[in-house]
Image: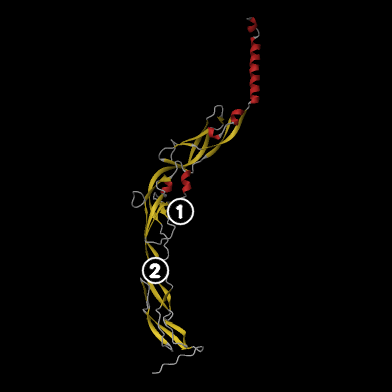
Amino acid sequence: MSWVTDSWRLKLAAIGLAVLMLGAVAFAQNPPTFKTLTVSGFQWTIPTGLIVINAPTKTTVRVTGLADTIQTMTADRLIGTFDLSKVSPGPAVKVNLAVTSQVGGVTVQTPSVPFVLNVDRRATVPVTVQVRPPRAAAGWVVTKAEAKCPNTVPCVVHFDGPAGWELDGNGKANLSAFVDLNSPVAGESLIVGNLPVTLEQNGRPLDPATFAKTVPVSSLDVSGVEVQVTAKTATTSKQVVLIDSPPSHGPPAGYRVVGITIDPIAVVISGKADALVKITSITLPAVDLTGHTSDVTFRLTIEYPPNVTGTVQTARVTYSIAANPNVQPSPTPSP
């Protein structure tokens, strides 16, 4: 066995050199490399009483490994985790995002990524829903408008989110809830369901899109409510003109009406707005001009429509009658 033990140092060096050469060839074919990936969909460990405002949603990291592994490496094989179990609320809380690879042989170069988070207390507050004064169609007056929530009177919804959104600097509630009825009211009773609730913070609408930017996501327990409205027609007045009717019988042959005078020419009427809206004039009763060959005046009763009253009850209508030069008058009957 002397051939094994003879010059063993030289032989060991030869073996080591051979291994190195094989490794060099292997690395030449599959060298180490890197790739930049965007990590998203973070996992959060947050105590029940905390919430993150404008939470980050992605970050960029570099991963390293052998070329054939890195070539197929995708961002969904990376996990980013925030652990807030030991933090306290504050507007600038320093927390590290731990990024790990689920693929063997792939290393994250910076496995701990620093972030500054806005961490607030999480709270749930009740907010009474108010109906903004709805528009009323012409002639209508809204007498009552109220929101209806399941199992609560008055209608109350609950907002779950950052305490800083719910209270002002003095600890007073600064959230209000409103519902809007966009269509004008034109009826005694109206019920509209599933109208969206709008939250306002210090008088300004709170964009629901901001709810999704918190972790956990902020929410309203009831997003749509029913609105019940009652209304009545208003009593109002308007001026309309008086119009004569064609005579039931005209003057004798050879005579004609050359003018008509109505006094008053217009009257003021009063009543429910829905009854007045279509009235633009009032027609006087027809008269009989049989036997009249000169001016004649009639005192006519003004007939107002149902549920409508007027300031004047009678009108004087004067018909001016003259001979028709184109027609021979009928002879005056002998006495």
Question: Where residue 265 sits in the image (x, y, percent)?
Answer: 43, 79
Instruction: Judge left or right: residue 301 versus residue 323.
Output: left
The number of numbered badges drawn on the structure is 2
- Considering depth in this image, is 119 or 145 the residue closer to the camera? 145
Question: Where residue 35 sits in the image (x, y, percent)?
Answer: 60, 33
Question: Where residue 20 sits in the image (x, y, percent)?
Answer: 64, 19
Badge 1 marks a residue whose secondary structure is: strand
Which part of the image, by quadrant, shows the C terminus?
bottom left
Residue 162 appears anywhere in the view: no
Residue 319 appears anywhere in the view: yes
| Residue at screen point 47% across, 44% down | 212
Q: Amino acid at mark 1?
A: Arg
Dot 1: within a 10 Å radius of its alpha carbon, few (fewer than 14), some, or many (20 or more) residues? few
Query: For residue 229, which quarter of the picture?
Result: bottom left
Dot 2: within a 10 Å radius of its alpha carbon, few (fewer than 14), some, or many (20 or more) residues? some
Which of the two discs, 2 and 1, labels the residue nearer the N terminus? 1
Q: Amino acid at mark 2?
A: Ala
| Residue tagged 2 | 275
The mark lying in front, picked from 2 and 1, is 2
**Could you say which disc has been placed on residue 79 in the image?**
none
Residues under labels 2 and 1: Cα distance?
41 Å
| Residue tagged 1 | 204
